[in-house]
Image (spheres, rainbow, N blue to C red):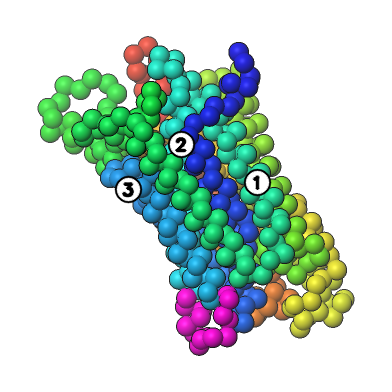
Amino acid sequence: MDGGKYYFCFSPGVFFASGLVYSYKLLEYSVMAVIITYLTSSSEQINLTKASVIVNTKDLISATSVIVLTFISNTFIGRPKVITCSAIFTSAGLVMLYFIAHAEESDEIERRILFKIIGVFVTAVGEAGVMALLGDFIADQLRAREPKTNKNEDRVEARKTVWWRGSWCFSVITSFLIRYYSWADTFSFSAKATVITLIFFVGGTAWLHYCGKSAPAGSHNYYSHDVYFYQSRRPRLTDQAKVREPSTLRPQGQDMEGRLHSGKIFLNMIPMGSSFLVYGLVVSTEETFFPEQGDEMQLSSFFTILFVFQSVSSKSISYLFSYFLDSEWVPVDKRKQAKLVRIWFGMVLTIFCCFVAERVEVHRLIVVNKEGFLDKPDQIIPMSIFWLAPQYCLLGLTKGIAEEGLDEFLIDNFPISWKGYVSAITKFVIGIGNLLSIISVHAYGSLFADTLNRSRLDEYYKRITIFSFVNMCYYWCIYIFYTKYHTANVVGDDIVPKLSIFP
């Protein structure tokens, strides 16, 4: 087999979509991941507590938008239109942020803060829509290039990864370069990149439709030249779960049976989902307190490198765990339990992540007091930003183990009609942790002052370390329940294990 042909395939649709991958990863690294530093450093002097609430609310809105937009794309208008509308939202939000940053003193403080918050939220909604659907859109285009009689999903995934990582590399380089820009220039550059890549994306899909044959009326297929582009239309989320075994019930009985089965599935998911609330609380620190710690450190322009460390560690550990769980070392009948143990390892790493972050913050405060910077929040602390590398890497490992494990758990337990919503549901469940973060920041309000140097972030980290330990124990109890009521459904000659709390 030709290795080059296996990993690379040119498709016009993918070529134009990869531009959006570039602009959106650039937006993530240069703006959204560090937006709290803009809020706290602006002329309005938004304090740390308010800024963290804004960012956590932004992430909660983003998580909700993912599941809503995924449903809309799968049920009504398809991925290309949702991606286009989301990109327009992103552009509008960035333009709004640009004008506010460009004219800081031109309006009342309250009005500027309001427009900043609206700009951040609008941008977050747009970003969520594009990033949730873009990967599936690219996979659809590559899947269309597969032979009709021998479609290889592994090859499709490998090719998608090549295209995605190529755009990702360019976005990392650009993000590193524009770290020297002012916030106004950063918003402007990101907005221009989004608009330009959106124009290419829209132009590319229009070209595909124009040059191809007309799709049959009422179908959802796309054609281009002699290539058959198929955009899968998944069943609606509200569709009844299909019963695998033949049923002798009448249609009304089958409908009732499907609803009961669907309700049972959701009941089984509640304990697992609840264990990810504290996990979401830990993950929320990635866009709130982590950037604040590094904003005034030396070499802060290398922030993008920390994001690269995190991404690489996440993808690497996810690949290693998946390879191990699919290997002959793990018996087939034990793989579902092994996936639950995988999630537990992710929960364990949240403890280490919080502990390391607390130790780094203790050291940072020692340096701040030694240098007399307690009331000088804008002074550069003589401490390299790479002190934050361990906690970013640990958070990346946590994501690669726990979040990917939750995805696989949901895939194993959801009916086929819901498979397309797994990633969106995972993001939503974790996003609820941002609400818990908002509550915890207010509950421990005495630990936070107007500036980070005057706050006791180390004590906050210490407390969520304790929460993470308790959550790890709680998850282990859930694991015991899931495995205790381990049953099996017989489908033909195969035994399909099913994990359930409610037998």
Query: How many other residues sit within 10 Å of disc 3, few (<14), some (14-19) or many (≥20)?
Result: some
Q: Residue at x 80, y 62 (%)?
A: 299
Query: Is residue 122 toward the left or the right of residue 172 in the image?
Result: left
Q: Which residue is mark 1?
A: 170
Q: Residue furthest bottom?
A: 108
Query: Is residue 150 toward the left or the right of residue 157 in the image?
Result: left
Task: Using the rendered image of the protein, determine whether residue 452 is visible from the camera's viewpoint.
Answer: yes
Task: Using the rendered image of the protein, determine whether residue 394 is visible from the camera's viewpoint.
Answer: no
Q: Which residue is mark 2?
A: 13
Query: How many other residues sit within 10 Å of disc 1, few (<14), some (14-19) or many (≥20)?
Result: some
Cα–Cα gap, marks 3 and 2: 21 Å
Q: Residue at x 42, y 60 (%)?
A: 89
Q: Label 3, secondary structure: give it.
A: helix
**To which quarter of the image does residue 252 belong?**
top left
Q: How many marks?
A: 3
Q: Quadrant of the N terminus?
A: top right
Q: Up-down: is 493 above or below 11?
A: above
Cα–Cα gap, marks 1 and 2: 19 Å
Q: Identify residue type, mark 1.
A: Phe
Q: Residue at x 66, y 44 (%)?
A: 169
Q: Quadrant of the C terminus?
A: top left
Q: Position of residue 189 (x, y in %)?
A: 59, 61
Q: Which mark is residue 72?
A: 3
Residue in front for this viewpoint, 217 or 275: 217
Residue in front for this viewpoint, 178 or 353: 178
Cα–Cα gap, marks 1 and 3: 31 Å
Q: Up-down: is 369 above or below 77?
A: below
Q: Label 2, secondary structure: give it.
A: helix
Observer-side mark, 1 or 3, equals 1
Q: Give the residues drawn in magenta, as a range.
A: 101-115
